[in-house]
Amino acid sequence: MNKQMKVYLDNSATSKMDEEVLKEMLPYFTEKYGNPSSLHSFGKEARDALNHSREKFAKFLNCRAEEIYFCSGGTESDNLAIKGIAYAMKKQNKNHIITSPIEHSAVLNTCRQLEQEGFKLTILNVDNEGFIDLKQLENSITEKTALVTIMFANSEIGTIQDIKKITNICHKKKTIFHTDAVQTFAKIPVDIKKLDIDSLSIASHKFHGPKGVGLLYVKKNIPIESIVQGGGHEKGLRSGTEDISGIVGMTKAADIALKNLGKNYNYMAKLRDRLINELSKIENSRLNGSKGEKRLPNNVNFSFSGVEGEALIMLLDMKGVAASAGSACSNILKGESHKASHVLEAIKCPENFINSPLRLTLSRFNTEEEIDYAVSAIKESVSNLRKISPFK
Ligand SMILES: Cc1ncc(COP(=O)(O)O)c(C=O)c1O
Protein backbone atom coordinates (compact mmCIF):
# COMPACT_ATOMS: atom_id res chain seq x y z
CA MET A 1 0.00 0.00 0.00
CA ASN A 2 0.99 3.62 -0.57
CA LYS A 3 1.76 6.18 2.11
CA GLN A 4 -0.71 6.08 5.03
CA MET A 5 -3.68 8.46 4.75
CA LYS A 6 -6.41 9.38 7.21
CA VAL A 7 -9.80 8.67 5.67
CA TYR A 8 -13.05 9.31 7.52
CA LEU A 9 -15.80 7.02 6.21
CA ASP A 10 -18.15 7.10 9.19
CA ASN A 11 -20.27 10.11 8.28
CA SER A 12 -23.52 8.43 9.34
CA ALA A 13 -22.17 8.24 12.90
CA THR A 14 -21.37 11.93 12.76
CA SER A 15 -19.82 14.38 10.33
CA LYS A 16 -17.16 17.05 10.31
CA MET A 17 -18.48 20.50 11.04
CA ASP A 18 -18.27 22.83 8.06
CA GLU A 19 -15.94 25.82 8.76
CA GLU A 20 -18.66 28.16 7.47
CA VAL A 21 -21.04 26.75 10.06
CA LEU A 22 -18.59 27.32 12.88
CA LYS A 23 -18.05 30.93 11.73
CA GLU A 24 -21.80 31.55 11.80
CA MET A 25 -22.11 30.08 15.32
CA LEU A 26 -19.23 31.82 17.09
CA PRO A 27 -20.85 35.24 17.77
CA TYR A 28 -23.71 33.44 19.54
CA PHE A 29 -21.30 32.22 22.23
CA THR A 30 -19.48 35.43 23.00
CA GLU A 31 -21.50 38.44 21.76
CA LYS A 32 -25.09 37.47 21.02
CA TYR A 33 -25.48 35.20 24.02
CA GLY A 34 -28.89 36.35 25.25
CA ASN A 35 -31.70 34.02 26.31
CA PRO A 36 -34.42 34.13 23.64
CA SER A 37 -37.07 34.31 26.36
CA SER A 38 -35.60 37.52 27.86
CA LEU A 39 -37.27 40.88 27.24
CA HIS A 40 -34.12 43.00 26.79
CA SER A 41 -32.18 43.62 23.60
CA PHE A 42 -29.86 40.63 24.16
CA GLY A 43 -32.93 38.44 24.40
CA LYS A 44 -34.46 39.97 21.29
CA GLU A 45 -31.26 39.37 19.32
CA ALA A 46 -31.36 35.67 20.27
CA ARG A 47 -35.12 35.51 19.63
CA ASP A 48 -34.65 37.01 16.17
CA ALA A 49 -32.04 34.36 15.36
CA LEU A 50 -34.38 31.63 16.61
CA ASN A 51 -37.32 32.94 14.57
CA HIS A 52 -35.11 33.31 11.50
CA SER A 53 -33.97 29.68 11.83
CA ARG A 54 -37.55 28.50 12.23
CA GLU A 55 -38.59 30.39 9.08
CA LYS A 56 -35.63 28.96 7.17
CA PHE A 57 -36.46 25.36 8.18
CA ALA A 58 -40.10 25.92 7.23
CA LYS A 59 -38.83 26.75 3.71
CA PHE A 60 -36.31 23.89 3.66
CA LEU A 61 -38.95 21.35 4.63
CA ASN A 62 -42.00 22.97 3.01
CA CYS A 63 -44.05 23.38 6.18
CA ARG A 64 -45.07 26.24 8.51
CA ALA A 65 -42.63 27.86 10.93
CA GLU A 66 -44.95 27.15 13.88
CA GLU A 67 -44.77 23.44 13.09
CA ILE A 68 -40.99 23.32 13.90
CA TYR A 69 -39.80 22.53 17.46
CA PHE A 70 -36.07 22.74 18.16
CA CYS A 71 -34.55 20.14 20.49
CA SER A 72 -31.29 18.35 21.32
CA GLY A 73 -31.02 15.95 18.36
CA GLY A 74 -32.37 12.81 16.75
CA THR A 75 -32.90 10.77 19.90
CA GLU A 76 -34.90 13.45 21.67
CA SER A 77 -36.87 14.29 18.55
CA ASP A 78 -37.88 10.63 18.03
CA ASN A 79 -38.79 10.25 21.72
CA LEU A 80 -40.84 13.43 21.74
CA ALA A 81 -42.74 12.50 18.58
CA ILE A 82 -43.46 8.90 19.49
CA LYS A 83 -44.23 9.27 23.20
CA GLY A 84 -45.85 12.69 22.77
CA ILE A 85 -48.27 11.49 20.07
CA ALA A 86 -48.88 8.11 21.77
CA TYR A 87 -49.81 9.72 25.11
CA ALA A 88 -52.10 12.23 23.42
CA MET A 89 -53.82 9.53 21.33
CA LYS A 90 -54.28 7.28 24.35
CA LYS A 91 -56.76 9.87 25.57
CA GLN A 92 -58.74 9.09 22.40
CA ASN A 93 -58.65 5.40 23.34
CA LYS A 94 -55.94 4.50 20.82
CA ASN A 95 -53.16 2.34 22.21
CA HIS A 96 -51.50 0.64 19.23
CA ILE A 97 -48.19 1.56 17.61
CA ILE A 98 -46.70 0.20 14.39
CA THR A 99 -43.02 0.33 13.50
CA SER A 100 -40.36 -1.62 11.60
CA PRO A 101 -37.59 -3.94 12.83
CA ILE A 102 -34.84 -1.84 11.21
CA GLU A 103 -35.43 1.41 13.10
CA HIS A 104 -32.68 3.17 15.04
CA SER A 105 -32.72 2.35 18.75
CA ALA A 106 -34.05 5.87 19.44
CA VAL A 107 -37.30 4.63 17.86
CA LEU A 108 -37.26 0.90 18.69
CA ASN A 109 -36.46 1.37 22.38
CA THR A 110 -39.03 4.15 22.69
CA CYS A 111 -41.68 1.87 21.20
CA ARG A 112 -40.62 -0.96 23.52
CA GLN A 113 -40.86 1.40 26.50
CA LEU A 114 -44.41 2.27 25.46
CA GLU A 115 -45.15 -1.45 25.16
CA GLN A 116 -44.02 -1.84 28.79
CA GLU A 117 -46.46 0.93 29.67
CA GLY A 118 -49.37 -0.99 28.12
CA PHE A 119 -49.35 0.01 24.44
CA LYS A 120 -49.67 -2.77 21.83
CA LEU A 121 -46.75 -2.90 19.41
CA THR A 122 -46.67 -4.30 15.88
CA ILE A 123 -43.27 -4.67 14.22
CA LEU A 124 -43.66 -5.11 10.48
CA ASN A 125 -41.62 -7.42 8.26
CA VAL A 126 -39.04 -6.11 5.82
CA ASP A 127 -37.79 -7.82 2.67
CA ASN A 128 -34.16 -8.75 2.10
CA GLU A 129 -33.27 -5.22 0.96
CA GLY A 130 -34.98 -3.60 3.96
CA PHE A 131 -38.25 -2.39 2.39
CA ILE A 132 -41.27 -2.67 4.65
CA ASP A 133 -44.20 -4.87 3.70
CA LEU A 134 -46.82 -2.31 2.60
CA LYS A 135 -49.67 -4.85 2.47
CA GLN A 136 -48.89 -5.92 6.03
CA LEU A 137 -48.82 -2.24 7.08
CA GLU A 138 -52.28 -1.70 5.60
CA ASN A 139 -53.64 -4.85 7.26
CA SER A 140 -52.10 -3.99 10.63
CA ILE A 141 -53.72 -0.57 11.05
CA THR A 142 -56.88 -0.76 13.17
CA GLU A 143 -59.19 1.79 14.78
CA LYS A 144 -56.92 1.46 17.84
CA THR A 145 -53.75 2.53 16.01
CA ALA A 146 -52.31 5.71 17.49
CA LEU A 147 -49.19 6.04 15.37
CA VAL A 148 -47.11 4.49 12.60
CA THR A 149 -43.38 5.30 12.81
CA ILE A 150 -41.11 4.17 9.96
CA MET A 151 -37.66 5.58 9.24
CA PHE A 152 -37.19 7.45 5.94
CA ALA A 153 -33.79 5.93 5.13
CA ASN A 154 -31.93 3.30 7.09
CA SER A 155 -28.80 4.26 8.99
CA GLU A 156 -26.99 0.94 8.48
CA ILE A 157 -27.89 -0.22 4.98
CA GLY A 158 -29.15 3.03 3.41
CA THR A 159 -32.49 1.68 2.14
CA ILE A 160 -34.92 4.53 1.32
CA GLN A 161 -38.58 3.67 1.98
CA ASP A 162 -41.40 4.74 -0.32
CA ILE A 163 -42.69 7.37 2.12
CA LYS A 164 -45.49 8.61 -0.15
CA LYS A 165 -46.97 5.12 -0.41
CA ILE A 166 -46.71 4.76 3.38
CA THR A 167 -48.42 8.09 4.10
CA ASN A 168 -51.16 7.23 1.58
CA ILE A 169 -51.89 4.01 3.46
CA CYS A 170 -51.78 5.68 6.89
CA HIS A 171 -54.02 8.55 5.87
CA LYS A 172 -56.50 6.34 4.04
CA LYS A 173 -56.83 4.60 7.42
CA LYS A 174 -56.82 7.93 9.31
CA THR A 175 -53.61 7.18 11.21
CA ILE A 176 -50.78 9.54 12.14
CA PHE A 177 -47.38 8.95 10.52
CA HIS A 178 -43.97 9.89 11.98
CA THR A 179 -40.67 9.37 10.21
CA ASP A 180 -37.09 9.44 11.47
CA ALA A 181 -35.34 11.42 8.72
CA VAL A 182 -32.05 11.76 10.63
CA GLN A 183 -30.01 10.07 7.88
CA THR A 184 -32.16 11.38 5.05
CA PHE A 185 -32.44 15.14 5.40
CA ALA A 186 -29.81 17.00 3.37
CA LYS A 187 -29.00 13.82 1.37
CA ILE A 188 -32.15 13.56 -0.76
CA PRO A 189 -35.13 15.94 -1.14
CA VAL A 190 -37.50 15.93 1.85
CA ASP A 191 -40.71 17.82 1.05
CA ILE A 192 -43.19 17.45 3.88
CA LYS A 193 -46.23 18.70 1.95
CA LYS A 194 -45.55 16.62 -1.12
CA LEU A 195 -44.97 13.50 0.96
CA ASP A 196 -47.87 14.33 3.33
CA ILE A 197 -45.80 13.64 6.47
CA ASP A 198 -47.36 14.33 9.90
CA SER A 199 -44.20 14.30 11.99
CA LEU A 200 -40.47 14.15 11.20
CA SER A 201 -37.15 14.11 13.09
CA ILE A 202 -33.80 15.65 12.09
CA ALA A 203 -30.34 15.85 13.73
CA SER A 204 -27.81 18.53 12.79
CA HIS A 205 -24.57 16.58 13.25
CA LYS A 206 -25.38 14.25 10.36
CA PHE A 207 -25.06 17.08 7.82
CA HIS A 208 -21.96 18.97 8.97
CA GLY A 209 -23.71 20.95 11.69
CA PRO A 210 -23.00 20.87 15.44
CA LYS A 211 -23.83 17.91 17.70
CA GLY A 212 -26.58 18.06 20.31
CA VAL A 213 -29.14 19.94 18.25
CA GLY A 214 -32.03 18.83 16.08
CA LEU A 215 -35.67 19.45 15.44
CA LEU A 216 -39.08 17.89 15.36
CA TYR A 217 -41.69 18.85 12.78
CA VAL A 218 -45.27 18.17 13.84
CA LYS A 219 -48.17 19.09 11.57
CA LYS A 220 -50.62 21.61 13.02
CA ASN A 221 -53.53 19.93 14.84
CA ILE A 222 -51.75 16.59 15.33
CA PRO A 223 -52.33 15.73 19.01
CA ILE A 224 -49.03 15.70 20.93
CA GLU A 225 -48.06 16.13 24.57
CA SER A 226 -44.79 17.32 26.04
CA ILE A 227 -42.63 14.69 27.73
CA VAL A 228 -40.49 17.01 29.87
CA GLN A 229 -41.99 19.60 32.15
CA GLY A 230 -40.50 23.05 32.53
CA GLY A 231 -40.81 26.65 31.44
CA GLY A 232 -42.94 25.98 28.36
CA HIS A 233 -40.41 26.83 25.65
CA GLU A 234 -41.12 25.90 22.05
CA LYS A 235 -44.83 26.62 22.46
CA GLY A 236 -45.00 24.41 25.53
CA LEU A 237 -43.90 21.23 23.72
CA ARG A 238 -40.20 21.22 24.55
CA SER A 239 -39.18 23.08 27.69
CA GLY A 240 -35.58 24.17 28.12
CA THR A 241 -33.67 27.22 26.90
CA GLU A 242 -33.02 26.85 23.19
CA ASP A 243 -29.41 26.28 22.07
CA ILE A 244 -29.22 29.35 19.86
CA SER A 245 -25.65 28.85 18.61
CA GLY A 246 -26.48 25.22 17.78
CA ILE A 247 -29.71 26.14 16.02
CA VAL A 248 -27.94 28.87 14.02
CA GLY A 249 -25.24 26.34 13.09
CA MET A 250 -27.78 23.69 12.08
CA THR A 251 -29.58 26.27 9.91
CA LYS A 252 -26.36 27.28 8.15
CA ALA A 253 -25.41 23.61 7.64
CA ALA A 254 -28.82 22.87 6.10
CA ASP A 255 -28.59 25.97 3.91
CA ILE A 256 -25.20 24.92 2.53
CA ALA A 257 -26.30 21.31 1.98
CA LEU A 258 -29.60 22.13 0.31
CA LYS A 259 -28.11 24.73 -2.04
CA ASN A 260 -25.96 21.95 -3.51
CA LEU A 261 -28.23 18.95 -2.92
CA GLY A 262 -28.19 17.63 -6.49
CA LYS A 263 -24.48 18.23 -6.96
CA ASN A 264 -23.61 16.58 -3.63
CA TYR A 265 -25.93 13.66 -4.38
CA ASN A 266 -24.21 12.97 -7.70
CA TYR A 267 -20.76 13.39 -6.20
CA MET A 268 -21.36 11.04 -3.27
CA ALA A 269 -23.26 8.50 -5.40
CA LYS A 270 -20.28 8.34 -7.76
CA LEU A 271 -17.89 7.63 -4.86
CA ARG A 272 -20.39 5.13 -3.41
CA ASP A 273 -20.64 3.25 -6.71
CA ARG A 274 -16.85 3.22 -7.08
CA LEU A 275 -16.62 1.61 -3.64
CA ILE A 276 -19.41 -0.88 -4.38
CA ASN A 277 -17.81 -1.87 -7.71
CA GLU A 278 -14.41 -2.43 -6.16
CA LEU A 279 -15.57 -4.24 -3.02
CA SER A 280 -17.85 -6.52 -5.07
CA LYS A 281 -14.68 -7.88 -6.67
CA ILE A 282 -13.61 -9.37 -3.32
CA GLU A 283 -14.48 -13.06 -3.27
CA ASN A 284 -17.36 -14.06 -0.99
CA SER A 285 -18.48 -10.51 -0.36
CA ARG A 286 -22.08 -9.34 -0.10
CA LEU A 287 -23.61 -5.88 -0.50
CA ASN A 288 -26.23 -5.44 2.24
CA GLY A 289 -29.30 -3.32 1.43
CA SER A 290 -30.76 -2.09 -1.81
CA LYS A 291 -28.89 -2.55 -5.04
CA GLY A 292 -30.87 0.03 -6.93
CA GLU A 293 -31.78 3.71 -6.79
CA LYS A 294 -33.44 3.47 -3.39
CA ARG A 295 -30.17 3.65 -1.50
CA LEU A 296 -28.72 6.72 0.22
CA PRO A 297 -26.01 8.27 -1.96
CA ASN A 298 -23.51 8.09 0.91
CA ASN A 299 -24.10 4.52 2.16
CA VAL A 300 -22.13 1.35 1.47
CA ASN A 301 -22.59 -1.77 3.61
CA PHE A 302 -20.65 -4.93 2.81
CA SER A 303 -20.09 -8.26 4.52
CA PHE A 304 -17.14 -10.56 3.90
CA SER A 305 -17.57 -14.19 4.88
CA GLY A 306 -14.83 -15.59 7.11
CA VAL A 307 -14.03 -12.14 8.48
CA GLU A 308 -14.90 -10.93 11.97
CA GLY A 309 -16.45 -7.44 11.67
CA GLU A 310 -14.78 -5.78 14.61
CA ALA A 311 -11.34 -7.15 13.73
CA LEU A 312 -11.76 -5.60 10.28
CA ILE A 313 -12.75 -2.21 11.76
CA MET A 314 -9.69 -2.26 14.07
CA LEU A 315 -7.32 -3.27 11.27
CA LEU A 316 -8.69 -0.54 9.02
CA ASP A 317 -8.29 1.98 11.82
CA MET A 318 -4.61 1.02 12.06
CA LYS A 319 -4.34 1.83 8.36
CA GLY A 320 -6.04 5.22 8.94
CA VAL A 321 -9.51 4.32 7.64
CA ALA A 322 -12.42 5.10 9.99
CA ALA A 323 -15.40 2.84 9.31
CA SER A 324 -18.00 1.12 11.43
CA ALA A 325 -19.86 -2.14 11.74
CA GLY A 326 -23.25 -0.44 11.86
CA SER A 327 -24.95 2.13 14.02
CA ALA A 328 -22.67 3.92 16.47
CA CYS A 329 -25.38 3.29 19.04
CA SER A 330 -24.77 -0.44 19.26
CA ASN A 331 -21.04 -0.78 19.37
CA ILE A 332 -18.30 -2.53 21.27
CA LEU A 333 -17.86 0.45 23.62
CA LYS A 334 -21.29 -0.28 25.01
CA GLY A 335 -20.49 -3.94 25.61
CA GLU A 336 -22.50 -5.24 22.64
CA SER A 337 -19.59 -6.54 20.60
CA HIS A 338 -21.00 -9.93 19.78
CA LYS A 339 -24.57 -8.98 19.05
CA ALA A 340 -25.43 -9.21 15.37
CA SER A 341 -26.97 -6.10 13.86
CA HIS A 342 -30.77 -6.12 14.29
CA VAL A 343 -30.98 -4.63 10.80
CA LEU A 344 -29.01 -7.45 9.19
CA GLU A 345 -31.08 -9.96 11.17
CA ALA A 346 -34.30 -8.36 9.94
CA ILE A 347 -33.23 -8.54 6.27
CA LYS A 348 -32.25 -12.19 6.84
CA CYS A 349 -28.59 -11.71 6.04
CA PRO A 350 -27.12 -15.23 5.62
CA GLU A 351 -25.29 -16.63 8.65
CA ASN A 352 -21.83 -16.56 7.06
CA PHE A 353 -22.17 -12.82 6.41
CA ILE A 354 -24.02 -11.54 9.47
CA ASN A 355 -21.01 -11.07 11.76
CA SER A 356 -18.86 -9.17 9.31
CA PRO A 357 -20.66 -5.96 8.39
CA LEU A 358 -18.59 -3.02 7.22
CA ARG A 359 -20.48 0.27 6.94
CA LEU A 360 -18.73 2.98 4.94
CA THR A 361 -20.57 6.29 4.92
CA LEU A 362 -19.45 9.19 2.77
CA SER A 363 -19.69 12.94 2.81
CA ARG A 364 -19.08 15.69 0.28
CA PHE A 365 -15.63 16.14 1.85
CA ASN A 366 -14.39 12.68 0.76
CA THR A 367 -12.23 12.41 -2.37
CA GLU A 368 -11.62 9.77 -5.05
CA GLU A 369 -8.09 9.38 -3.77
CA GLU A 370 -9.45 8.56 -0.31
CA ILE A 371 -11.85 5.99 -1.78
CA ASP A 372 -9.04 4.29 -3.70
CA TYR A 373 -6.88 4.22 -0.57
CA ALA A 374 -9.77 2.76 1.47
CA VAL A 375 -10.41 0.10 -1.19
CA SER A 376 -6.81 -1.14 -1.07
CA ALA A 377 -6.83 -1.03 2.76
CA ILE A 378 -10.03 -3.11 2.82
CA LYS A 379 -8.81 -5.63 0.24
CA GLU A 380 -5.55 -6.10 2.11
CA SER A 381 -7.26 -6.35 5.52
CA VAL A 382 -9.90 -8.84 4.36
CA SER A 383 -7.23 -11.00 2.79
CA ASN A 384 -5.03 -10.91 5.93
CA LEU A 385 -7.93 -11.66 8.26
CA ARG A 386 -9.06 -14.58 6.11
CA LYS A 387 -5.59 -16.10 6.38
CA ILE A 388 -5.93 -16.30 10.17
CA SER A 389 -9.71 -16.81 10.33
CA PRO A 390 -11.04 -19.66 12.47
CA PHE A 391 -14.28 -19.55 10.38
CA LYS A 392 -12.68 -20.84 7.16
C1 LIG B 1 -31.65 7.06 12.03
C2 LIG B 1 -31.17 7.71 13.29
N1 LIG B 1 -32.07 8.14 14.19
C3 LIG B 1 -31.69 8.73 15.33
C4 LIG B 1 -30.37 8.91 15.64
C5 LIG B 1 -29.98 9.58 16.92
O1 LIG B 1 -29.58 10.90 16.67
P1 LIG B 1 -28.72 11.72 17.76
O2 LIG B 1 -27.38 11.11 17.76
O3 LIG B 1 -28.73 13.12 17.22
O4 LIG B 1 -29.44 11.61 19.05
C6 LIG B 1 -29.39 8.47 14.74
C7 LIG B 1 -27.95 8.60 15.04
O5 LIG B 1 -27.14 7.81 14.63
C8 LIG B 1 -29.80 7.86 13.53
O6 LIG B 1 -28.94 7.41 12.63
Image: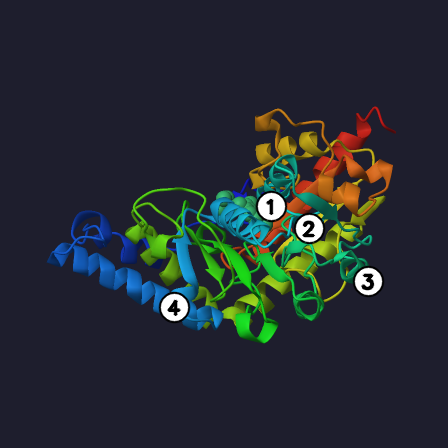
What crowding class fits label 1: few (fewer than 14 Cα within 10 Å), some (14-19), or many (20 or more)?
Answer: many
Please report contact status of discs 3 and 4: CB closer than 8 Å, yes or no: no
Of mark 4 and mark 1, the one earlier in the sequence is: 4
Q: CA distance from mark 2 to mark 4?
A: 28 Å
- Residue 337: give x, y in percent of width and height: 67, 27
Viewer-proximal residue among 187 and 198: 198
- Element under label 3? helix
277, above or below 119, in the image: below
Ranked by sequence position, the earlier of labels 1 and 3 is 1
Residue under pointer 4: 65
Residue 275 visible in the picture: yes
Residue that label 3 marks: 135
Q: Establish whether ligand 1 lies closer than 8 Å to the Cβ of label 1.
A: yes
Disc 1/disc 3 C-alpha distance (Å): 22 Å
If the image is split into quadrants, where does the C terminus sit? top right
Q: Residue at x 45, y 70 (%)?
A: 60
In the visual, does 229 lie left or right of 385?
Answer: left
Badge 3 or badge 4: first in the primary sequence: 4
Residues under labels 2 and 1: Cα distance? Answer: 8 Å
- The colour scheme used to paint the residues is rainbow
Residue on which the image places disc 1? 107
Q: Residue 257 at x, y = what percent?
A: 46, 65
- Marks 2/3: CA distance? 14 Å
- Distance of mark 4 from mark 1, alpha carbons? 25 Å
